[in-house]
Image: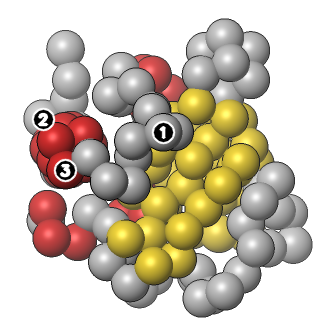
Amino acid sequence: MTEHVWSYKSTAGHLAGADLTGYKVEATDGGIGKVDKHSDGVGDAYLVVDTGMWIFGKEVLLPASTVVSIDPEERRIFVDRTMGQIKQAPEFHRDKHLGDAGYREELVTYYATSGPFGIPPA
């Protein structure tokens, strides 16, 4: 699974090049915020979600593999994690998320083991 963390599932309905900025993001148990930034890079696709007041202004990075479906008409993205799992994710570091291999490995490990088939975080 870890090699696919940074790729959209074929069933997610993602269209390459689509601008997802501003789309609302829904966890399995509620809304978590809006897409602030995203990447469609092959093997490097992700969403950066501004959680607003939910986690007091924290941003979270969600690898593309967490996306279950995208509804372009409603401008909503549904992910396969709970609000608690997203809240417990490694803190997003805007200045180092692209070039820091250690941070990216931390994200891969977390999301590969916190999913619907993985081990939920404590």
Instruction: Report, in whole angstroms, how far the alpha carbon at label 1 lies from the one at label 2.
Output: 29 Å
Q: Disc 2 marks which residue?
A: 119
- Residue lying at 38% horizontally and 84% vertically, measured from the top left: 42
SS state under label 2: loop
Q: Which amino acid does label 2 sit on?
A: Ile
- Residue lying at 66% horizontally and 28% vertically, measured from the top left: 51
Up-down: is 114 above or below 75?
A: above
Q: Residue 94, how many percent across, how many down?
A: 52, 39
Dot placed on the residue nearer the N-terminal end, 3 or 1: 1
Q: Disc 3 marks which residue?
A: 101
Q: In which quarter of the image is residue 110?
A: top left
Q: Quadrant of residue 21?
A: bottom right
Q: Are marks 3 and 2 in contact (CB under 8 Å)?
A: no
Q: Can residue 97 be seen in this view?
A: yes
- Residue lying at 58% horizontally and 82% vertically, measured from the top left: 13
Horizontal side of residue 26 vs 83, given as left or right: right
Q: What residue type is labelled 3?
A: Ala
Up-down: is 76 above or below 40?
A: above
Q: Disc 1 marks which residue?
A: 95
